[in-house]
Image: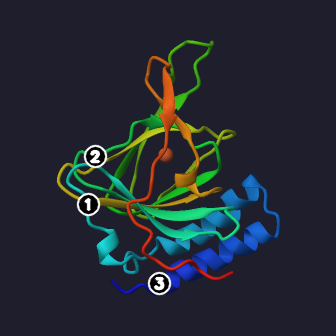
Amino acid sequence: MNARIPDPLAIFVDGLTGLVDGGADEATIFRDGRALLAGLIAHDDWLPAALTEPDPANYRIHLLHRDPAGRFSVSAMVWGPGQGTPIHDHTVWGMVGVLRGRERCEEFGLPARPGGSLVPGHVHELEPGDIDFVSPSVGDIHRVSNALAGGTSVSIHVYGADIAAITRSRWETDGRVTPFVSPYASCLLPSRAS
Ligand code: FE
C-alpha cells in the first residue's frame, strides 16, 4: 500500500496537534477537535483500502497516527457483519466518527453501589458523519457494534492516549471487571512529523 499519510488525515493531525500544543482541555478538544474530526470524516475517500477490509473473526483497529509525545492517537476500526466490542471503558477522552456504514452504541452507567450491576443507558446508532464522545467525565462505558447485518462499517477513533498501550476495563453487565487491552492490527502509516 501507499504508506504516505493521506492529506485529510495530515490536516486533522496537524490541527489536533495544535490544539494539544496549546494546552486544550477536554471541553475544548470536544468542541474544536470535533470540528476537525467532522472535516476528516466528511468524505470517505482517503483511508487506504487495505485498512478497510474486515477480518472474518473479529473487528480490528489500525493505527493511523500516534502523537510522538503520546498525547493522542488516531485509529480506524473496521467491523464486519455481526462484529462488536465487549462492554469496555476508555479512561481517557475519546471521539468516534463514523466514516462508513452504521454503528450501534449501547451506553452504560457505573454500578450504583460497589459490586452492583452496570446501569443500562442510552442506545443509539451512528451514521457516516456522526460523532460520539467518551471519557470518564461524559460517560466512559459502552459497547459498540456494527449495525449493518450485511456490510462493513468503519469509524475513526481519536483518544487522549496511545489507546493500545493502556490497560482498560472490560465489563460484564453484572458488574464484573477484567483487564482489557485492544492492540493494533497494523501500524502501516508513517507517523506525522510534528
Ligand atoms: Fe469504545
List x then y, in percent, for residue 111. 58, 19
Note whether residue 120 is visible: no
Amino acid type of the residue that numbered disc 1 sits on in the rendered structure:
Pro
Q: Quadrant of the C terminus?
A: bottom right
Say if mark 2 contacts mark 1, CB within 8 Å: yes
In this picture, residue 42 sits left or right of residue 78: right
The numbered mark, 2 or 1, whose residue comes first in the sequence reads 1
List x then y, in percent, for residue 113. 63, 12
Comparing 167 with 73, the one in front is 167
- Label 1 sits on residue: 54
- 143 over 11 or under it: above or below: above
Residue in the picture at 56% in, 77% down: 191
Label 1 secondary element: loop
- Label 3 sits on residue: 6
Comparing 175 with 97, the one in front is 175
In this picture, residue 183 sits left or right of residue 37: left
Say if mark 3 contacts mark 2, CB within 8 Å: no
